[in-house]
Amino acid sequence: MLQPETGLLKLTKDSRLLKGSIVALVTPMEEGGAVDWKSLDALVDWHVEEGTHGIVPVGTTGESATLTATEQTAVIAAVVNRVDGRIPVIAGTGANSTQQALALTHSGRAAGADACLIVTPYYNKPPQEGLYRHYCTIADQVDVPIVLYNVPSRTACDLLAQTVARLAKHERIIGIKEACGTPDRVSEIKQRVDEKFIVLSGEDSQTLTMMQYGAVGTISVSANVVPNLMSKFCQSYLSGNIAEANELDRLLQPLHEVLFLQTNPIPAKWALHAMNRIPSGLRLPLVALAEEHHASIRNQLMKFKAL
């Protein structure tokens, strides 16, 4: 298990703390949609015990799009408090408005997050110059390490490697979660940035290939369900045990597939509920997993002895 430095975590471009399996944490909710704080604490403890290397609260998987700003800050603070310095906490603070993302990032920093993960502005489809200015505005005004997040399938805009290279020159922008769907984008980025700039996979099924291109781990959906195996998989590759990493990746691929049978985090939350770790709650417009997918996910959970 990767261990943080003693004392306060300091994530800079000289740091190697952000690597391995970083869970994109679900936000546990009661059936009516209220945040289940007790389950949230229990999930954090479980991840630390199982060897997860970092936690991202209120990212896409944490249903940030349907949480209020007050709730987002409260979830971040709760995770920070429960983690208590044991592993890094990277708060999701993105929005499609620069001013809103700026405010959320200020709040994430104030709540004690070690870094902030900021998705590209969604829906309004900014050009590359707009993306560059968006991130620079936030990085200039908030004293916190920033990890860019590129996921065009959700946002309708693509943060290109050239723009990443421009942003990587900012002292507070330390890395990127890359989920463009094309693993060799990692190579494009790595060729243009300082070697200390961190690249993390945002696609579980592509993490092995991305690490072969230079990524140092993943911000993972599957880690919600099998945290120990995702940790072991990443650690095996990073420590040079490529054969073991390949074998674990082969075993994990069917799980990655079923966890995206419907929109994330619907399948992951169904799986965790089946494992008796969280209630069944989601917030509209997300709805419960279609019954036709239950058997596929249950079979995978049984294979990994998660039930």
Image (spheres, rainbow, N blue to C red):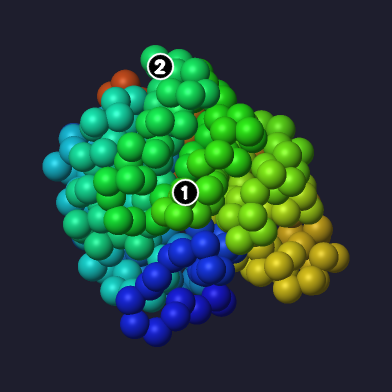
Q: Which residue is mark 1?
A: 170
Give neighbour class at mark 1: few <14, some 14-19, many 20+ (Cα, 10 Å).
Answer: some
Q: Position of residue 161 (x, y in %)?
A: 64, 35
Look at the image and tell me in which quarter the N terminus lies. Answer: bottom right
Residue, x 73% and y 39% (percent of image)? 188
User: Residue at the bottom extreme?
Assistant: 6
In whole angstroms, how far apart are the C-alphas of marks 1 and 2? Answer: 26 Å
Establish if 206 lies above or below 84.
Answer: above
Residue, x 25% and y 55% (percent of image)? 109
Q: Are marks 1 and 2 in contact (CB under 8 Å)?
A: no
Residue type of the residue flagged with mark 2: Tyr
User: Residue at the left extreme?
Assistant: 70
Q: Position of residue 199 (x, y in %)?
A: 61, 51
Q: Position of residue 182 (x, y in %)?
A: 71, 33
Residue, x 67% and y 59% (percent of image)? 195
Residue, x 48% and y 24% (percent of image)? 129
Task: Say the numbered circle drawn on residue 283.
Answer: none
Horizontal side, residue 21 vs residue 244: left or right: left
Horizontal side, residue 29 vs residue 302: left or right: left
| Nearer mark to the viewer, of 1 and 2 | 1
Q: Which residue is mark 2?
A: 123
Q: Position of residue 52 (x, y in %)?
A: 50, 66
Identify the secondary structure beneath mark 2: loop
Please say whether residue 267 is visible from this viewpoint: no
Q: Nearer the viewer, residue 11 or 153?
A: 11
Give neighbour class at mark 2: few <14, some 14-19, many 20+ (Cα, 10 Å).
Answer: few
Q: Quadrant of residue 31?
A: top left
Q: Earlier in the sequence, mark 1 or mark 2?
A: 2
Please say whether residue 9 is visible from this viewpoint: yes
Residue type of the residue flagged with mark 1: His
Identify the secondary structure beneath mark 1: loop
